[in-house]
Amino acid sequence: MSARLVALSGGSCSGKTTMLAALARSGFRTVPEAALAVIDELVAEQGGVNEQIAWRKSHWQEFQERVVLKQVELEQSAASEEGIVFLDRCQVDSIAYCRLRGLKMPSLLQSGMLAGRYSAVFVLDTLSRFDRRAESGRTSDRETSLRVRDLLMSAYEELGYSPMLVPELPPNERLAFVLQKLILALQKPATNTLDDAMFQLQSLVHTDQQHRSIFELLASASRSSVI
């Protein structure tokens, strides 16, 4: 069985790192962000954080090409796995970032190959308390992050996806929100009960830890008003 790829997206400081870490602790396979891997490579190549920032600002097109190439490699590896795999961004995100910067679409980005590739898409809303994390080499601010969020939503919708906007919530409640929405997204057309959808999700996870995490999170969420 091939993997069911689930995209987690959002602008800078949207909580993706926290969400992916929580999913990993719950036993799910996660894939890191391609852009951050490329930034780490550039820090080494250019001799420091400030140097790689300067290089990126004068080579946006080349940077985006490298990100797409890295993303394709990561997704190809993830697709060979079984069960659910959560991606920290996916190829569609590069469409939004190219539009943000007014860049040409990289040749590797083929819309026909991206439609229907991902089982579910979540776009995390930008957090109200914005942390630029300049030491990591990021250059975004909150205004840009919000614009990226909107560009991401549009890019996914144009490819036929129904991206789910994840509101700002305490981490555990946010995780429960994503898992329940994922259960509903994975329902087959003939499935019309949450129990049936839950069974389908169980069939896609492979450890007792994942089963326990799902039940515990959803039980907790059912006692709150977040879902």
Image: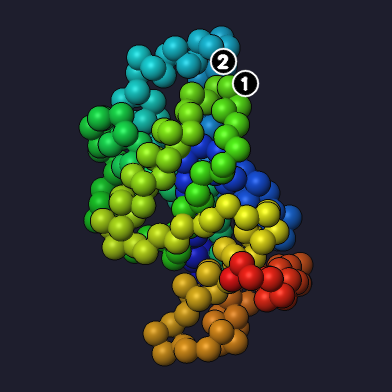
1 vs 2, front mark: 1
Q: Residues within 10 Å of mark 1 (few under 14, many from 20)?
A: few
Image position of 117 with respect to 196: above or below: above
User: Crowdedness of circle 2 by 10 Å Cα count: few (<14), some, many (20+)?
Assistant: some
What is the x, y in percent for residue 199?
Answer: 60, 83
Residue 37 appearing in the image = no
Residue at the location (34% across, 62% down)?
161
Q: Earlier in the sequence, mark 1 or mark 2?
A: 2
- The residue to which callout 1 is attached is 135
**Quadrant for the C terminus in the image:** bottom right
Residue 137 placement (x, y as % from top left): 55, 22
Q: Which mark is residue 102?
A: none
- x, y (%) of residue 90? 43, 48
- For label 2, the residue is 49
Which residue sits at x=35%, y=14%? Answer: 58
Residue type at mark 2: give it: Val
Residue at (56% x, 43% y) in the render: 127
Q: Are marks 1 and 2 in contact (CB under 8 Å)?
A: yes
Where is residue 194, by image quadrant?
bottom right
Q: Is residue 172 above or below residue 141?
A: below
Q: Is residue 35 above or below residue 219?
A: above
18 horizontally vs 164: left or right: right
Q: Judge left or right: residue 116 versus residue 16.
A: left
Residue at disc 1, secondary structure: helix
Judging depth in this view, the residue of 149 and 95 nearest the camera is 149
Residue occupying the point 44% across, 82% down: 188
Answer yes or no: is residue 172 visible.
yes
Q: Nearer the viewer, residue 6 or 110?
A: 6
Amino acid bearing label 1: Glu
Q: 175 left or right of 124?
A: right
Q: Secondary structure at mark 2?
A: helix
